């Protein structure tokens, strides 16, 4: 296939479908109940505080700014953004995540957040209150029509659109890639990465500013049994006969220190940002080359 004939939106959709098939369900499906969302929110703050702080610093928030947070999750970015800006609108489809977000809003006595409880693809922009000075999607791009999502964000933004997404293959994908053939008799396929987003934006006539930063973190367990149980639940491994396969992998890839059994991960995040008003809104400029 010739380079200019590649449909990058289709490539994203195909990669997303393979990812969902490998995982057993779309990523948002893992956080439908409040208990799971609470665990996610707590871990996100404990293990990824540096990432959250870095993300906030790169957004250059100001007191008069109106923000749209697409895929807001439990509000770990929305709540601190609300404390630094005039207004935040969140878009989040997961009932569990929205329940935790409601708790965070109440606990922090936030009065300047509006919540929209549906997927971005399904949002009617007439329910929004544009224009927004900032539209942000941080590690929340588990959707099929990425081009349609970008166009809708551009429609409601007069300032900056900022995506934060995976750069390269995150180390946490190593484990399912190694285990899937033995456990599920099929290969594991990870999600689409930032290279597709860049290529799609470029083809749309949008040339984003790119920044990358590390998001290294670890899982810590009291024992090998608790580690195996954790990953068995995460990977939906229901058969006891597969637990030894998980344990063998962990013995090879974990280390013990004074914190317990530690499973470390390396991860790079890419920020792609642009100002829609600086570029052709038709999304066809790049196709004319």
Image (cartoon, rainbow, N blue to C red):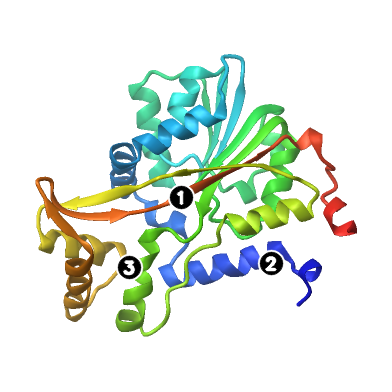
What's the CA distance linking mark 3 and mark 1?
17 Å
- Residue 43 locus on image (x, y percent): 29, 43
The nearer-to-camera label among 3 and 2 is 3
Q: Which residue is mark 3?
A: 175
Q: Is residue 250 left or right of residue 102?
A: left
Q: Residue at x 56, y 24 (%)?
A: 60
Q: Which residue is mark 1?
A: 268
Residue in front for this viewpoint, 247 or 235: 247
- Residue 245 locus on image (x, y percent): 21, 77
* Numbered badge on residue 148: none
Residue in front for this viewpoint, 87 or 64: 64
User: How many C-alpha atoms fall within 10 Å of the one at disc 2: few (<14), some, or many (≥20)?
Assistant: some
Which residue ends up furthest to the top in the rendered image? 63
What's the CA distance linking mark 3 and mark 2?
27 Å
Q: Residue at x 55, y 69 (%)?
A: 17
Q: Residue at x 39, y 64 (%)?
A: 173
- Residue 73 locus on image (x, y percent): 44, 42
Q: Is residue 189 left or right of residue 12?
A: left
Tell which circle, 3 or 2, labels the residue nearer the N-terminal end.
2
Confirm or deny contact between disc 3 and disc 1 (CB under 8 A): no
Tell which circle, 1 or 2, labels the residue nearer the N-terminal end.
2
Q: Is residue 60 left or right of residue 31?
A: right
Which residue ends up furthest to the bottom in the rendered image? 185
- Residue 183 locus on image (x, y percent): 30, 80
User: How many C-alpha atoms fall within 10 Å of the one at disc 1: few (<14), some, or many (≥20)?
Assistant: some
Q: Which residue is mark 2?
A: 10
- Secondary structure beneath dot 1 equals strand
User: How many C-alpha atoms fall within 10 Å of the one at disc 3: few (<14), some, or many (≥20)?
Assistant: some
What's the CA distance linking mark 1 and mark 2?
24 Å
Q: Residue at x 34, y 81 (%)?
A: 184
The nearer-to-camera label among 1 and 2 is 1
């Amino acid at each position: 296939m010739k380079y200019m004939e590649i449909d990058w939106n289709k490539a994203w959709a195909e990669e997303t479908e393979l990812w969902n098939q490998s995982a057993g369900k779309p990523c948002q499906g893992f956080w439908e109940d409040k208990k799971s969302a609470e665990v996610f929110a707590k871990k996100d703050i404990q293990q990824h505080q540096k990432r959250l702080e870095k993300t906030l610093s790169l957004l250059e928030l100001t007191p008069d700014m109106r923000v749209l947070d697409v895929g807001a999750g439990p509000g770990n970015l929305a709540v601190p953004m609300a404390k630094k800006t005039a207004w935040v609108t969140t878009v989040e489809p997961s009932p569990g995540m929205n329940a935790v977000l409601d708790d965070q809003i109440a606990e922090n006595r936030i009065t300047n957040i509006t919540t929209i409880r549906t997927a971005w693809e399904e949002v009617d922009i007439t329910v929004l209150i544009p224009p927004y000075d900032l539209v942000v999607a941080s590690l929340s791009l588990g959707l099929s029509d990425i081009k349609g999502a970008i166009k809708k964000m551009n429609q409601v933004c007069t300032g900056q659109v900022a995506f934060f997404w995976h750069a390269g293959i995150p180390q946490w994908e190593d484990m399912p890639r190694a285990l899937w053939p033995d456990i599920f008799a099929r290969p594991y396929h990870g999600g689409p990465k930032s290279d597709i987003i860049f290529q799609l934006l470029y083809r749309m006539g949008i040339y984003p500013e790119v920044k990358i930063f590390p998001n290294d973190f670890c899982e810590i367990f009291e024992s090998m049994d608790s580690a195996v149980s954790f990953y068995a639940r995460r990977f939906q491994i229901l058969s006891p006969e597969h637990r030894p396969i998980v344990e063998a992998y962990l013995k090879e890839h974990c280390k013990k220190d004074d914190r317990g059994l530690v499973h470390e991960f390396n991860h790079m995040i890419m920020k792609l940002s642009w100002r829609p008003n600086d570029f052709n809104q038709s999304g066809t400029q790049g196709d004319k080359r």
